[in-house]
Amino acid sequence: MAHNHAIKSGYARLADRLNRFPQGAPPSESLFKILSMLFNENEARMVSLLPIKPFTALIASKAWKLDMNSTQKMLDTLSSRAILVDVERNGESVYTLPPPMAGFFEFSLMRVRNDLDQKVLGELFYQYLNVEEDFIKSLFTQGETQLGRTFVQEHSLSEENALHVLDYERASEVIKSASHLGVGMCYCRHKMEHLGKNCKAPMEICMTFNDTAESLTKYGYARRVDAVEGMDLLQQAQENNLVQFGENVREKVNFICNCCGCCCEAMIASRKYAILNPVHTTNFLPDVSEESCTGCGKCAEVCPVEAMTMVSANDALKPKQKKARLNPDICLGCGVCVRVCNPKSIKLANREKRVITPLNGAHRTVMMAIERGKLQNLIFDNQVMWSHRALAGLLGAILQMPPVKQIMASQQIKSRYLETLIKRTNY
């Protein structure tokens, strides 16, 4: 009985640690079962002590109260199972505990593994994400700043509006400029395969970049590829009418998923919670020419979020004639519909209001934390004290935000020091 209690409390502490991420990880019996498959009880307890920010082996040894040899062995073990992201900086390994998504949930199904029952794990993920929904709601529907954004399919752009697409808005530029590039199995379709619900879209097409790719390719969770193969995979994804859903940052994008509407969590969330804008859109909207639209319905068939539908053409001479109609409030602006329109009746037009993308992961994380009432978890990480440099970087990100967000931040951490900085910045 005492042993069971110890296990439960270890996983409960880890769940509490994960729930301090801005995205959150609401505790449930399914979550505890998932964690028990990915961690043993001691690992769960140890990981619950790790800081939210990136850390070194020395910091981990202090948090764990272990000698450096034992600490390094534990870090290597966790990194080899893609629990931690391990990258080298100036000759020293720096570790990060990624959030469950996009993070170690997905990494666990990015390759076929024999060290755990992936069918059972896939079923648990489906229960936690698709049936219970608390996690997906906390991930996709809280706050204005979301984890991911849509990339426009560049071939769908006219020469004129292509001039207005910035480099960070192009999946091709992310591929070409990445320091490391890897490809692995699509977590979503792999999960659905174990439930007999997967579609026929390509499986090995999930792209990772930069730090995440460096770590995942090192331990075999993704296959290292070059930019040429990356571009070929991007073309393959677009030929299969998949949507490019990537990290919502301008600098050092860490992932681009090639999403189908039936299996992928982001697209499912976009349909279920469309009014809450769970995925950031591109800066474009399809414009349908009613005069040339033949009503073939191909655009509606490929739209992953059901933003394009077929309605009556109201033609008295052709009572069964249909035409395409867009719901702009839920459209992602991906451009998939443009590609399949044979009469070229759909073109992309600029949205009236430009979509703002956070500068980098730190900027996005701070924004998400402020909007979700979790900023104090980033600043007052009670597992390991923050360095002055890290705190300065966080405060710098806050001070670049609009005044309303700065006020929200100040209220959450109740810091006189931050209030003084904000006042000096705004006057």
Image (cartoon, grey):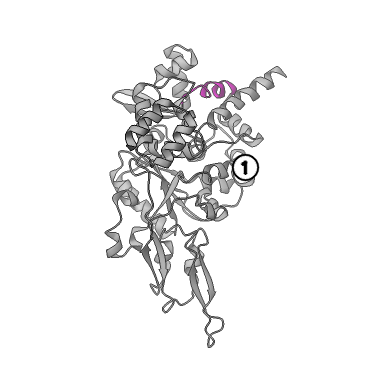
Which corner quadrant of the image does residue 183 belong to?
Answer: top left
422 and 159: which is toward the camera: 422
Residue located 54% across and 87% down the image: 316
- Say if residue 112 shows up in the picture: no
Name the residue type under label 1.
Glu
**Residue that appears at 41% across and 22% down:** 386
Image position of 35 with respect to 142: above or below: above
Circle 1: element type: helix
Identify the residue at image location x=41%, y=58%. 334
Residue 426 percent coordinates (x, y): 34, 37
Q: Is residue 343 left or right of residue 166?
A: right
* Image quadrant occupied by the N terminus: top right
Q: What x and y, as percent, mark residue 288? A: 42, 71
- Quick check: can you spot residue 60? yes
User: Would residue 44 be counted in the magenta stretch?
Assistant: yes
Q: Quadrant of the C terminus?
A: top left
Q: Which range is magenta?
A: 41-51
Q: Say left or right for 208 vs 164.
A: right
Is 194 positioned to the left or the right of 92 in the image? Answer: right
Magenta highlight on residue 122: no
Image quadrant assignment for residue 17: top right
Residue 64, horizontal then vertical, whole percent:
49, 16
Query: Mark 1 = which residue?
Result: 123
Tell which residue pokes out farthest to the front in this image: 427
Q: Main secondary structure of the magenta part?
A: helix
Residue 292 lies in quadrant = bottom left
Crowdedness near tag 1: few (<14), some (14–19) or many (≥20) residues, C-alpha within 10 Å: some
**Position of residue 95 measured from the top left corner of the image (x, y, whole percent):** 41, 26
Task: Note whether 165 is above or below 93 in the view shown.
Answer: below
